[in-house]
Amino acid sequence: MKLLSFALLFISSLSYAEQFQAPLTHTQWQIIESPLECILSQPIEGFGEAKFIRRSGENFSLVFTSSSHPAIEGDAYFEIAEASWQNSEQRQLLEKLSTESNQTEFRLSGDLAKKALTRTQEGQFPTFRFRSHSSAEEISVFLSTVHFTDSLPAFKQCLANLHPDTFEQIRKLTVYYSLEGTTLSSDAQASLIRIAEYLKVDNSIKGISISGHTDNHGRKRLNVPLAEARAIAVKNFFIEQLEVAEELITISSHREFKPAQTNKTKLGRAHNRRAEIEVFK
């Protein structure tokens, strides 16, 4: 009854706006859970959807999306509407943003999005207000809180279990070797462990390329096997210590022919004694 009276309150106090909300008796919250992405979304009839979302390595966000109500160039507002029992028609502004013509996705990120989640849990209503090409009136969209607490525990558990790295963060990594060395340092091993841990949660990975390199010091007959041995050291660590499938891995060696930095300085040569790892989807 309180939710119904709240809706009526908005209709009377904001009659100048075209409003959208999920039906009070059929509000749905949908959860997508994975180690790389957590989404808690609500379809909003006639508008599109709103969703709380976080992907690994990215900010927490509240996103309103509509394919049928593209924005005009101007201003839009993320707000919090009070619960009906608070007997207030006021809205608390979270953020004002500029919209581009035909924009259909509107995002609130970081701490403000987390605040919107908390306020939803408390029974208040995150809203989004903007002007659209599709309507002469201002459009106002607000989330229904119905059934929200039923879905919230699973969503929070998903957030707690998100993998710390994104694909872009592990896609290219480099490990370095001591002079004439082929032994992986503790830092190098930590980099390889990051890749292997990511492979466990992303089944779209198709391959791993490892290339071995040397600086330009030393004899050719020594640098040829040295560059190859550095690539092999990475491959063997993946397979033997981290249980990465051997068929995913290809290796190559390039001696000093692809320097990362100049070979004219000690620091530059240290950066050239390396193996480069690239992960492919």
Image: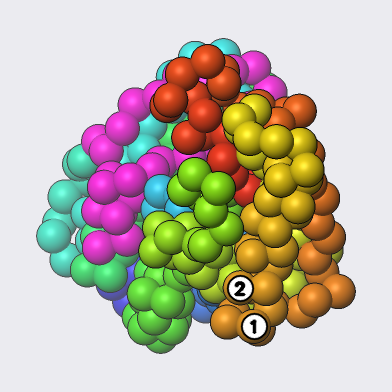
Could you tell me if residue 51 is visible in this image? Answer: no
Give the x, y percent position of residue 117.
32, 61
Q: Quadrant of residue 16?
A: top left
**For residue 112, side relative to residue 168 (left or right):** left
Mark identifier at residue 136? none
- Secondary structure of the residue carrying tag 2 is helix
The quarter of the picture where residue 114 lies is bottom left
How many angstroms separate mark 1 from mark 2 (CA)? 5 Å
Q: In this view, does 191 lie above or below 242?
A: above
Q: What residue type is labelled 2?
A: Phe
Q: How is the image coloured?
A: rainbow
Which one is in front, 250 or 48? 250
Which residues are drawn in magenta?
A: 93-118
Quadrant including the C terminus: bottom right
**Magenta-colored stretch includes residue 111:** yes
Q: Contact (CB < 8 A) between labels 1 and 2?
A: yes
Side of 221 where 118 appears, left or right: left
> Would you name the residue on which mark 2 appears?
237
Q: Circle 1 sits on which residue?
A: 240
Q: Which residue is found at the position 31% from the left and 41% from the top?
A: 79
Is residue 122 found left or right of 3 in the rendered image? left
Q: Residue 199 colored magenta?
A: no
Q: Where is residue 212 in the image (x, y as percent from the top left)?
A: 70, 48
80 vs 60, nearest the viewer: 60
Q: Look at 71% across and 45% down and name the residue there.
A: 222
